[in-house]
Amino acid sequence: MTEVVVHELAKSFRVRDAGGRSAVAQLVRPRYAVKEAVRGVSFTIGRGEMVAYLGPNGAGKSTTIKCLAGILAPTSGTVRVGGLTPVRQRKELARRVGVVFGHKTSLWWDVPVLDTYQLLRRVYDLPRARFEARLELLRDTLGLAEFERTPARQLSLGQRMRADLGAALLHGPSVLFLDEPTVGLDVLAKESLRTFIRRTNETEGLTVLLTTHDMRDVEELCQRILVIDHGRLVFDGTPAEITRRWVPWTEITLEVARPVPPMAGDGIEEVAREPGRCTVRFTRSRYSLPEVMAVLANHYPVLDCRVNEPTIEAVVRRMYESSATLPASRRPQP
Amino acid sequence: MRPLRGLSLYGHYLLLGFRSQAEYRVDLALMIFGVTVLNAVDVALLAVILTRFPALGGWSFWEVAFLYCLYLAALGLENTFLLHLVDIDELIRDGTLDHMLLRPRPVLLQMLAKDISPRDLAQVGLGLGGAWYSLHRLGLALGVAHWALLLAYLVAGAAVLGGIVLAICSVGFWTVRSRVFLAGTGELQEVVQHYPAHVFGQWFVGLVTLVLPFAAINYYPAAALLGKPTVVSGPLLALLPFLAAAGCLTAGGLVWRLGLRSYLSTGT
Amino acid sequence: MTSAVGHGGRVLLAFAWQGARTSTAYTTAYWMELLNAAVRVFAVVTVWAVLYRSYPQQFPVTGGQTKTYAAVTQLTAVMLTWWSGAHHRIARQVRDGTLYVDLLRPVSYPFQLLCWELGESAARLGLVVLPAGIPLFVLLGLGPPGSAAGGLLSAASTVLSFVLLYECNFLVGLVVFRTLSLKGVQHAYHALITLLSGLWIPLWLYPGPLAAISQVLPFRSIFYTPAAVYVGYLDGPAAVRACAVQLGWAVVLWLGLEAGWAGTRRALSAQGG
């Protein structure tokens, strides 16, 4: 059962482009350039899947989400969510999806959270009994009770995100789009948010597509990763596959008894050295771990060793870095 | 049934908006004070002019004051209920419009329902009070029917303004900053509010009647009620504000629809 | 000393450049500003022309002088943007906390703001006032200054107007540190300027009591003085005297500004924000 279908989605914008011309010239005849934010992206998401949508800033993540949520019409290609065509069937779609933008709250700023929810009940035509039941559930799982009578502007960021998540799920959507839901939160707040999302996915079969820069979100929530770069989908697979593909090596840190010349062989090489410690990298397709250990033990006076499995964080960082045309300033610092 | 539901939803939105504003009561009092002071000064300036000069373009001081007050009241009425139209560009920029698009309701309803502005209601009162006093000084006692007509003109005037504002601000869907276009008509509005339009020549009257019909807000209604001559006369003069209102609302609605469609296809 | 002056000049230039950039950052906003300026000058000049045609005996000056006075005051107002000057910048900076960034700079805050405003006004002069004003002067048949000396004095007087207005705005802006908001105060202040500066109506048409009040306040020096000197209503010694009054107010208000700012700074550092 597929919930989301994206086929050859493309979206381009016209942007103002001064191109180094003088302010006066731009005044008289503004010049524009076409920016292709998304170019030919295709994927499907099954019901109940939780998928991470990754990519460097400006890669086209938010644009895709907006196309799915019915805020933007595609330039070309098709998008279906729950069998609906987003922009054309905006109001029907709105009853079926929930969206949270981490950077911008949907709550009424100056009134208690509960008042916002009461209004949303009418916006979505929820029967009172259903609303109360839903609210009770959210109170339990999101811990709303402690701050539901507080105006949104007085909430901590973590509380606000919980309240926003509640607002997005109040009408019981079957699909949830999250655009950087954990941005700016502290570790504990992130953890409670993730727990909630995971639990809702398990109990309600909620389909989730989330963009994030925090790889812990990915590790803890998602069975599948999509990576977009320069508007194109460059990866679609499991966390294990992404590691295999982008970091084909594993690193081993060795404690050595005395310095020896660095090893530089075929598929094994030393990449870092500190007093009493060397880090060696080997290509997994060439060697198995036992083979490598044997080779290393031959060369180094090994006292102890530790295998460093690549984290998704490292994988993604490497992926972004290897994206050659990316402007230097946009690259995440290692 | 559906319009009723829409109305009840509007009511609930307003309630929330009102609660938001309740947090800023002191500001409200200050704003009402400010609006009163500014308008009092404007009228005082008119008084300085018209005590020295008995008439401007054939209109006496109290006739001009009446003209001024009609505009003030209509502007107040428009701002009271349609205040957030001018926020279109802001709502686009800060992403609120996206949130509105995520809800299963008409976006325009959500926008207008954000709240109403009691400060501007005070302006309606000020305008009506001033209009009444001007009539009193002119020695004109309007009957019930004429007062009803005056109020109808007020609503029509608010609709004219609302339509124009909606049309102009909907340009925000294309250019990111639409408030500047509205600001571009600011001086024109000031001129129409302060002085009888014919003072500036026939071409000006044509401009504020046919292109941007600000004159339908106060000039024609005042002329109709006070019996002053204008380029049009008779039933056409009496009906002109309503025709203008219908035209402006249609134009505004049209540009809004086109704009929203364009926004959905281009974003920002 | 020269290096201090050079430093000040460089700061000024930098801010002026910034001001020009801000003024032209939004194409449409710029065109609308130009349009508004034109509409406003046209309307005010027309009203005075009509009044002069109907009641010439009420005016102590010629019709040409009346129209020119109206145009000069309105264009000066556009250049100085008195309704959104330093007080608004202070309010904004207090609200969003960027004030502290400016306080960290090695140039005094009032001076920074002055440079900033000067930059914006200079930019507006070049980009709005002259492009809108010159065609309007030609189209509406408005006159040159009454005399060459009057023209020069009027230019100097306009610079003093700028300084005076800046000082008034800054002093009003200081209120923000107590109330955190300009609302209320701003309207009363704007009302005073509207009524007593001669911006809309030449002060020579004011009835006795109102004219007397305007005599003892600084606001008349902002719009009335340069325009009255320009059209030659104030001439010779009277013109020089009016400019001297301007200068006097500028000095007095600058002292007030320095004192007020020193007090505010003390209060700021005492409560640390």
Image: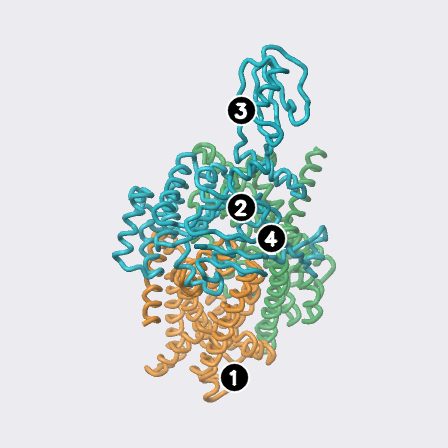
Which kind of residue does numbered mark 3 sit on?
Val
Instruction: Give above or below for C262 relative to A176.
Output: above
Q: CA distance from mark 3 to mark 1?
A: 92 Å
Query: Looking at the rendered structure, which numbered label has been put on residue A226?
Result: 2
> Counting residues from the N terminus, which is met first, the one under dot 4 or under dot 3?
4
Q: Can you tell which chain is drawn orange?
A: B
Q: Nearer the observer, disc 4 or disc 1?
A: 4
The chain containing the residue under callout 1 comes to B
Q: Are marks 1 and 2 in contact (CB under 8 Å)?
A: no
Q: CA distance from mark 4 to mark 2?
A: 16 Å
Q: Is residue C252 visible?
A: no
Closer to the camera in the image, C244 or B256 = B256
Q: Are marks 2 and 3 in contact (CB under 8 Å)?
A: no
Callouts 2 and 3 in the same chain: yes
Write down the colour of chain A. Answer: cyan
Which kind of residue does numbered mark 2 sit on?
Leu
Q: Secondary structure at mark 4?
A: strand
Query: Looking at the rendered structure, which numbered label has been put on residue B230?
Result: 1
In the orientation shown, which residue stands out farthest toward the left? A129
Quadrant including the C terminus of chain C: top left
Which kind of residue does numbered mark 1 sit on?
Thr
Q: Secondary structure at mark 2?
A: strand
Left or right: A241, with A47 as reference point: right
Q: Are marks 4 and 1 in contact (CB under 8 Å)?
A: no
- In the picture of the structure, the residue carrying the numbered disc 4 is A37
Q: CA distance from mark 2 to mark 3?
A: 27 Å
Instruction: Give above or below for A85 relative to A191.
Output: below
